[in-house]
Image: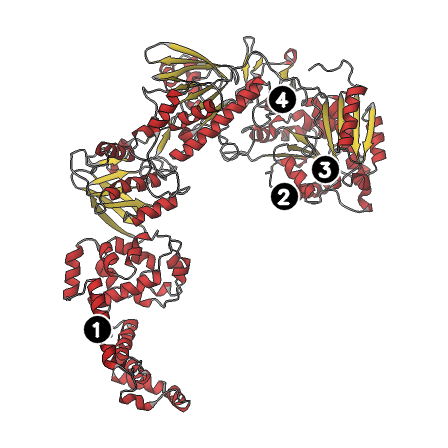
């Protein structure tokens, strides 16, 4: 987009929604004109209606206005009415940010008006530093979707994408489609009345995938290299025979499934002994029986069977899987009905600690009870295999030791994710290999072999792994999102799940992949700023090559070029600005969001001298959760101190410490930084942003001491989107705290 | 051991659950228990039971025949129906308890001298004599169920109540001579005999 050569700045003030009653809009106009240096300043009693919007549009079209500050409601409100793609727009939040939260009554008129004036100054200052983002459409962008894994999840994702009209390349390691599901006799019911096991349908799905003209299936193949970024992933697919195919893809769905937990690791539960099988083993026996009587490996017909749940799962000793795989209770119920449906006289006992049947599983459970499957609440301590199997267990209801005899024992073992290489292990190995460790060099080669995607990223060949080795997922808010933009995890590779959940997961991931290719083609960011056309750029002449941006980027978007300068892969970038916050020399910026756009807002606030006893507190609020919470406080008419000035930031990770030192130097009495929950159960939309902010701010105490300021003057806090009442309390308590320690001695120097 | 008991043991061998399903009133519901424990927590007399219903059901599945049938637990049920109302699986728990108690009694395995059981037996025997409960003889029988001396003590304790009832014409002392009954006494006896025969056939007690 070609912006006119000469920028023209305009401010539009709204006096609707009670703004005109509680504020002196005329005075605000003068502020915008004189202090904000706006060439055009207009007010309107109902700015967001057709007439008000038309006024702005006319000014842009006829008057050459290029930059506008709208002083009305929050930037989260009326986004469609105030959308002017051809202009740079800032919003001064006078409604949710001032009149709805500042105390009522004439005695508060002065501080309320001061608050509004500051927001107008800030809005004008911000827009003067903004540019209209142009997007980063580069070359022809591929909309093909690569699906890695040909099991139920992979096939479902491939078919979903193909049916939506997208080309798909499906890579399967083995010689046939179908994955784990193709070895099942039947599946847990997924349709009403949820009473009996249903046909799996893996073969039918595989046939549909093979017959679809839009899907190219690569069997006996693995991905040996993935380079590039969303819209332009260059993928090398090697066949077992040695031939290599190349595909240019826009997005990737990783549906690499799981492996069953190794039975040999469970000798105390009879792992490895005759007539002790896992659930996969029983499926094989049932398939072999093909509807007839299920026989053991030695040919004897099974007349009694015990299912031991949580075998090597939910383990607290640290030897086995600590988690619950979610599907195994329903799977054992299904397998017990294999026997009961054939012959009700066969004794089937499911030994559980907590029976967990999510979804509609309760109906299935009840139906199995009705068929006579016995459910015993107990914990197996020892399983003996052989001709006459025996399960020793502790009865958890009767609180006593007991034992059951059976012809066959089935262990419900857990799912171990196929998620490729652990990046921590990778980094350690690569570092050791680079320092000349021979063993590490061999290990690096082995790791490359188990890698799923072999990504050409500086962070390592696969997506980051989660607790217990599952593939990355923003599991609380956006389950298919990973820290590798345009690469989506689906199915049991990202968390334990059953077939139904896996197929639902696959559909979701396919839709995310479609979004990603479309956004990449339009030069826009991917989730969560999916409309955003801005992208980061670095002023390389100022760069000190410290590598903080490349290391701290949560999404692996920044590489280093041959001269060790940061090299942005814009399509991988989510526009969080964590690099901008990390940069010690402040050379990274976005067109419409930079150290200057925020820095100038901070400096625009009028700081009263200390004798006026009006503190000024800066709030840097994450636009995803904390800022909406502040808005919501306004919508609910909760009251907080009119001494605060809130600035939304894209992520707390984008907060550059220069903003904090600038604020303190110019006489602010305190800074509150509000970001999302960090840690294992993070809610940060950019995964690591708030964590980085907390880490950086933990080091700011030294700076404060140098300035001779109390450490309480900078506070970092976690605020969730639902914290509207709490955020008010936090603000008011902090203002009291600041009043108690006294105003900043730094006033008047800024 | 009675013959009926030996027959039942021989017939069901190791599967007490199947025995309960076949012979105990509402016994087929036992398999549907999901061991949530709501019945145990809801029973107002729960702390007085040796085994709450949840445990009784688990013991049935575990094949603890003597322990279940010899237990006084189900005899403690006061039929408040809290468990039935609250059971998420809709098991008729109260009825199952009574069914178990009845089955244990029929097999002769119910605990000897258990007060509820003794009272119920006295009540039944009193009732079927003439088709009406003779309150006077039933009360006296209850007073003397634990021996003659205790019976005198009980009667003296209740003296004022008895006299009061007589004054209010709620108690006729002449009932001690046999009292009144239903009109068709022989028809009543025939009916009870037939009902017993049908039930014995259903529950496996047919001779």
Which one is earlier in the sequence, the residue at label 4 or at label 2?
4
Residues at marks 2 and 1, common chain? no
Residue A666 showing in the rendered view: no
Mark 4 or mark 3, which has the lower sequence index?
3
| Residue occupying image coordinates x 80% and y 44% | A108
Q: Is residue B110 left or right of residue A2?
A: left
Mark 3 = which residue?
Answer: A97
Question: The residue tagged with tag 3: helix, strand or loop?
Answer: helix
Residue A47 at x, y percent in the picture: 77, 33
Above or below, B95 against A712 in this view is below
Residue wearing tag 2? A726
Foreground pick, B113 / A240 = A240
Q: Is residue A128 above or below residue B150?
A: above
Task: Let me know if residue B197 appears in the view.
Answer: yes
Give me the chain letter of mark 1. Answer: B
- Label of residue A580 in the image: 4
Observer-nearest of A737 and A81? A81
Q: Which mark is residue B193?
A: 1
- Is there one chain holding both mark 4 and mark 1? no
**Camera-side mark, 2 or 1:** 1
- Indicate the chain on which mark 2 is placed: A
Q: Nearer the viewer, mark 4 or mark 1?
A: 1
The answer to whether marks 4 and 2 sit on the same chain is yes
Please provide percent x and percent y for residue A365: 34, 46
Relative side of A718 to A290, left or right: right
Q: Residues within 10 Å of mark 4 (few under 14, many from 20)?
A: many
* Separation of residues labelled 3 and 2 (CA atoms): 16 Å
Q: Are marks 1 and 3 on the same chain?
A: no
Earlier-in-chain disc, 3 versus 2: 3
Q: Is residue A373 above or below residue A667?
A: below
For the residues labelled 4 and 2, the Cα–Cα distance comes to 29 Å
């Amino acid at each position: 987009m070609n912006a006119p050569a000469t920028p023209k700045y305009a401010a539009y003030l709204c006096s609707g929604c009670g703004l005109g009653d509680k504020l002196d809009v005329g005075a605000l106009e003068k502020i915008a004109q004189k202090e904000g240096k706006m060439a055009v300043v207009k007010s309107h009693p109902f700015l967001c209606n057709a007439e008000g919007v038309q006024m702005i549009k006319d000014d842009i079209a006829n008057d050459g206005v290029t930059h506008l500050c709208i002083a009305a409601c929050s930037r989260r409100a009326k986004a469609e009415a105030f959308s002017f793609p051809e202009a740079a727009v800032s919003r001064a939040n006078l409604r949710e940010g001032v009149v709805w939260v500042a105390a009522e009554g004439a005695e508060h008129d002065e501080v309320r008006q001061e608050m509004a004036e500051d927001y107008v100054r800030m809005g004008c200052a911000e827009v003067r530093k903004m540019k209209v983002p142009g997007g980063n459409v580069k070359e022809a962008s591929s909309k093909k979707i690569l699906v890695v894994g040909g099991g139920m999840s992979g096939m479902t994702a491939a078919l979903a994408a193909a049916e939506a009209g997208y080309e798909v390349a499906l890579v399967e390691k083995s010689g046939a489609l179908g994955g784990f599901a193709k070895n099942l006799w039947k599946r847990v019911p997924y349709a009403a009345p949820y009473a009996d096991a249903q046909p799996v349908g893996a073969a039918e799905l595989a046939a549909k995938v093979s017959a679809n003209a839009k899907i190219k299936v690569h069997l006996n193949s693995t991905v040996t290299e993935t380079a590039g970024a969303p819209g332009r992933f260059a993928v090398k697919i090697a066949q077992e025979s040695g031939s290599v195919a190349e595909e240019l893809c826009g997005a990737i769905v990783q549906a690499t499934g799981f492996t069953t937990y190794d039975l040999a690791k469970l000798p105390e539960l009879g792992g490895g002994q005759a007539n002790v099988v896992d659930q996969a083993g029983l499926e094989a026996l049932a398939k072999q029986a093909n509807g007839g009587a299920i026989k053991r490996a030695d040919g004897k017909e099974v007349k009694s069977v015990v299912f031991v749940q949580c075998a090597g799962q939910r383990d607290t000793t640290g030897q086995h899987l600590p988690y619950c795989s979610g599907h195994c209770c329903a799977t054992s119920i299904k397998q017990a009905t294999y026997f009961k449906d054939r012959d009700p006289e066969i004794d089937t006992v499911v030994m559980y600690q907590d029976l967990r049947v999510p979804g509609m599983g309760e109906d299935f459970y009840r139906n199995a009870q009705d068929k006579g499957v016995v459910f015993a609440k107990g914990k197996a301590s020892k399983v003996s295999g052989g001709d006459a199997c025996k399960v020793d267990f502790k009865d958890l209801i009767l609180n006593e030791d007991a034992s059951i005899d059976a012809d066959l024992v089935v262990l419900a073992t857990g799912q171990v994710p196929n998620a490729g290489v652990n990046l921590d292990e990778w980094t350690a190995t690569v570092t050791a290999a680079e320092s000349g460790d021979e063993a590490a060099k061999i290990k690096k080669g082995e790791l490359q072999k188990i890698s799923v995607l072999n990504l050409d990223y500086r962070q390592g060949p696969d997506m980051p792994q989660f607790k217990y080795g599952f593939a990355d997922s923003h599991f609380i808010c956006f389950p298919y999102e990973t820290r590798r933009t345009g690469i989506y995890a689906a199915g049991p590779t990202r968390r334990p799940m059953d077939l139904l959940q896996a197929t639902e997961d696959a559909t979701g991931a396919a839709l995310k992949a479609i979004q990603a290719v479309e956004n990449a083609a339009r030069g826009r960011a991917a989730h969560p700023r999916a409309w955003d056309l801005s992208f980061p750029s670095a002023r390389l002449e100022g760069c000190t090559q410290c590598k903080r941006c490349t290391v701290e980027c949560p999404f692996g978007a920044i590489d280093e070029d041959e001269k060790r300068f940061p090299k942005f892969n814009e399509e991988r970038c989510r526009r969080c600005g964590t690099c901008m916050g990390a940069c010690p020399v402040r050379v990274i910026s976005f067109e419409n969001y930079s150290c200057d756009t925020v820095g100038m807002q901070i400096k625009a606030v009028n700081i009263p001298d200390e004798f006026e006893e009006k503190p000024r507190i800066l709030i840097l609020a994450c636009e995803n959760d904390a800022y909406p919470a502040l808005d919501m406080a306004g919508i609910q008419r909760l009251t907080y101190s009119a001494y605060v000035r809130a600035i939304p930031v894209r992520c707390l990770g984008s907060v550059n410490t220069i903003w904090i030192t600038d604020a303190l130097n110019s006489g602010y009495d305190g800074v509150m930084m509000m970001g999302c929950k960090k840690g294992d159960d993070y809610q940060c939309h950019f995964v690591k942003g708030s964590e980085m902010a907390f880490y950086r701010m933990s080091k700011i105490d030294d700076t404060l001491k140098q300035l001779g300021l109390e450490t309480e003057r900078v506070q970092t806090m976690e605020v969730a989107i639902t914290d509207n009442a709490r955020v008010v309390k936090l603000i008011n308590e902090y203002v009291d705290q600041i009043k108690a320690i006294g105003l900043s001695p730094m006033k008047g120097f800024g | 051991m009675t013959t009926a008991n030996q027959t039942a043991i021989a017939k069901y061998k190791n599967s007490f659950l199947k025995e309960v399903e076949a012979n105990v009133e509402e016994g087929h519901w036992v398999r549907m228990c999901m061991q949530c424990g709501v019945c145990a927590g809801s029973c107002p007399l729960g702390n007085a039971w040796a085994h709450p219903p949840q445990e009784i059901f688990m013991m049935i599945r575990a094949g603890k025949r003597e322990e279940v049938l010899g237990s006084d637990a189900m005899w403690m049920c006061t039929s408040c129906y809290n468990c039935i109302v609250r059971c998420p699986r809709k098991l008729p728990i109260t009825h199952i308890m009574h069914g178990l108690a009845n089955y244990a009694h029929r097999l002769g395995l119910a605990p000897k001298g258990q007060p509820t059981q003794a009272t119920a037996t006295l009540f039944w025997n009193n009732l079927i004599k003439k088709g009406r409960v003779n309150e006077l003889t039933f009360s006296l029988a209850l007073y003397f169920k634990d021996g003659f001396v205790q019976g005198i003590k009980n009667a003296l304790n209740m003296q004022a109540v008895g006299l009061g009832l007589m004054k209010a014409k709620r108690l006729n002392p002449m009932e001690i001579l046999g009292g009144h009954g239903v009109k068709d006494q022989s028809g009543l006896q025939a009916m009870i005999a037939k009902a017993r025969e049908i039930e014995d056939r259903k529950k496996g007690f047919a001779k």
